[in-house]
Every structure is written in structure tokens, then in C-alpha cells.
Image: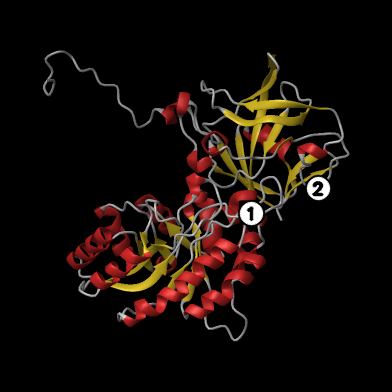
Amino acid sequence: MDYFRYRQGRLFCEEIPVEDLARDHGTPLYVYSARTILEHYHKLREAFTPPAPAPWQPILCYSIKANSNLSILRLMAREGSGFDVVSGGEIYRALKVGADPRKIVYAGVGKTDEEIEAGLRANLLLFNVESEEELENTNRLAGRMGKVADVALRINPDVDPQTHTYIATGKRETKFGVDLERARRVFERAKRLSHVRMTGLHVHIGSQITKSDPYADTLKRVAEFVPEVRAMGHPLEWLDMGGGFGIWYKEKLARSAREIADACLPLVLKTGLKLLLEPGRFIVGNAGILLARVLYVKESGDKRFVICDAGMNDLIRPALYGAYHRIWPAATDGSVSGEAPDEERWPGPAVASDVVGPICESGDFLAKDRRLPLVRRGDLLAVFSAGAYGYVMASHYNSYPKPAEVLVRGTQARVVSRRETYEDVIAAERIESLEPGARGED
């Protein structure tokens, strides 16, 4: 469920027409629904809470990489959420909004010494380690600081998550984690390290997974592995089963929180470990839209192009993954109510169009051969399911400033990231004149 709904042909975010937001704040514009974010968070937490008398409550560590806006992080922290971080910058963001360090899990395959030290200083709950060399380095740094780091080893169960190859992370051949045979050697090695304590297992098999079977297969393999690790003397406490739960983009194929939990929770309980989750897209994906203004409509050959002011610099997922985002005018005839209609079911005049942006790349598109109502210059389009991996992956390509972000709660709307200026685009740069013969020139 999300709270972007048409009322008599006008699209609302909660209680505010999105046309008003575009008028007040310009386009391109990211718009987020606080109610949607909170509802998805609570549904997931409730679904994964074991029945009474519950031996533990799951800790949901919202994955900051999905959408790192500080106001959204503050909203989550106040709700009791933990955080999954993958960089020193994300640690900084989480602490900036008052997150509880004992609910922060630090993942990521390429942690620098400085980032690991920052995590140790903050006394984070868990370091998800992805290689034997990283484990030894964490032990070295913790020893230098007089600390003992709680560590979970990321293992690859070699399960096919049945998702796009770019976002599949649980196979043996990915760069993430270690296979089970190597994991046994890592746990053996860890017994000789005095500044790390192996308290967890971590798995994360991919993103946008729309079935529960891959999770169940993964947890079965984990449950079989846990007794081996305990027999080595490691005080396992946590099972971090990652995230990657799919959302509805086009066809409603993704599983609900309850369906995923029903398939997974009995297997988690079988391990005897407490549960950590790392949801990101599931919470914010359908909580955001990108608003774009139509600049021009043109035909070339047999193609019709709708050219807007938002492009791959604002939302790269279609160009990068071939990702589908439903796109619909923010104002249609009064017959449209509820969620945006599927393109195939639109009863009025429609024509196949490529929705493209202003960027000088052939791959700059938001949709291809999409049946859309006839739109014209000045119309406002809404790109749905843009709350995750949208603004966070935006760039300054072609020297475009990044768009603004607005968070809506009921009848209130707040700018939570202002629109950048050209000065912002060049703020980190310096104009230097390197004359011939200047010191340092070869």
C-alpha cells in the first residue's frame, strides 16, 4: 500500500496534490510519503516478530543506501529503526540523526582502515565481514584501539535469487562474502584472533527478489551450518538475513511482508539466533515519485518521443538495469481514481512513446515504447516507485544540478533537500593555472 492516489483525475501525495508541489518547488522533484514509509516499516517488523512468548524482537536495520535523506533517516530512527550502513559516510549520516549505535550494522565489501576505526569508535552493534583478510585487518585495528569487535561473517549460500544479474549477490561467483567451504576456514582462523568475536552469520542474496523460495533455501543452508560454527566454540548470537525484498513496479508479483515471514520465520527460529533484517527498497521504494515536466513532444521515423526535464542523471535505474517504472500524467480526465492505471488498461486515447530526458546519451530514457495518454509541452508526469535508488544515485552529468526532495506527511510538505544551483555543481572544484615551468611539472 502506498499513499499516491488519484482523486477525480488529480494525483495526490497523501493530502496534497502533486501539481501544487511542482508549482511551489519546480521540477524535476522527488516527493516522498512519510505515511507509506512508516506503514511499510511496521508491516515488516510485525510480520517478522515471533509469536508470543517471543524469544526476541527482530531488529530492522534500514538500508541507508536505498535512500539516505537525513529527514527520512530521522523519521526511521524515531520509530525505533536500526540502520544498515556500507560506508563511513553512511555511519556519519546515521549518527547525525541520533541513531542508536547498538542498532547499526556495518556491511560492505571494501571498508577502509579509517572507516573501520570510525565504526569501532562508535561502538556499532556488528561488523559484517566479507573476507579472511578483512577479518584479520579488523582484528588488527581493534587491537590497536584496545577494543574487541563483534563480527558476522557474510556467507554465500550459492542460491539463485532469480533477479537481475547486476543485483544478484548470493552466488559463489559474486564479489560479496565467502562460500561455505571457505567460511569454515575463516571461522577456524578466527579462533586465534583475540580482538574479534564471531557473534553472527550474514547472508544477502540479492535485491528486488519477488519470491520467498530463495530466502527459504538460503535459511535451510544456514540452519545446517550453525551447529558447525557453534561446535568450533564461537558465541553465535545474530542471524542477519539481509533484505532485498521485492516491491511492485509493474505486475504485482512481489510477496507481502507476511508471506515472506511465513516462509522464513520458522527456519530462523530453528537456528536459535536472533534476527536482523536489512530492508531498504521494501520500505521506501513505493514511498517516492519523481515529478518531471514535459519539455517537447516530437516524432522521428516511427518513434514518438516525450522529452522531459528529468533524465538518467536524476533516475538512472532504467538506463542501468532496464528497470520498469510506471509513468503517468499527474492530471488526467476525472475518470481516474485510486492508483495509477496500467498502460494496457487505459481506456482513452494512447500512443506508444519513449519517455526521455535532456542528457546527451542515447541511453537517457525513463521508459521505452510506453503506451501513454496524449501529453503535450508543459504537462506534468509522475514516475512511480522512485523512492529507492533514485536520488541517491543521481549525478551532475552534463553539469545538471540535482533536484529537490520534498517529504509529505498528511497536509504538510517540507523541502528536505533543496534544489542545487550551478554553484553547488562546481563547489568542490578549483581553477588552477599550471604554467610551463611551474614547480611540480614534469
Say which quarter of the image contains residue 266. bottom right
The residue at which mark 2 appears reads as 338
Say which quarter of the image contains residue 224. bottom left
Say which quarter of the image contains residue 120. bottom left
Q: Residue at x 55, y 27 (%)?
A: 364
Q: Could you tell me the amino acid type at mark 1?
A: Ala
Circle 2 residues within 10 Å: few <14, some 14–19, many ≥20: some
Q: Is residue 154 left or right of residue 403?
A: left
* Residue sitting farthest toward the bottom: 53
Looking at the image, can residue 428 be seen? yes
The residue at which mark 1 appears reads as 34
SS at mark 1?
Answer: helix
Circle 1 residues within 10 Å: few <14, some 14–19, many ≥20: many
Mark 2 and mark 1: span between their CA atoms? Answer: 18 Å
Q: Could you tell me the amino acid type at mark 2?
A: Gly
Question: Tag 1 or tag 2, which sits nearer the N-term?
Answer: 1
Q: Residue at x 30, y 54 (%)?
A: 115
Looking at the image, can residue 68 be seen? no
Give percent across and percent down for residue 296.
68, 19
Q: Residue at x 85, y 28 (%)?
A: 349
Q: Nearer the viewer, residue 434 or 179?
A: 179
Give percent across and percent down for residue 257.
64, 64
Give percent across and percent down for residue 149.
29, 69
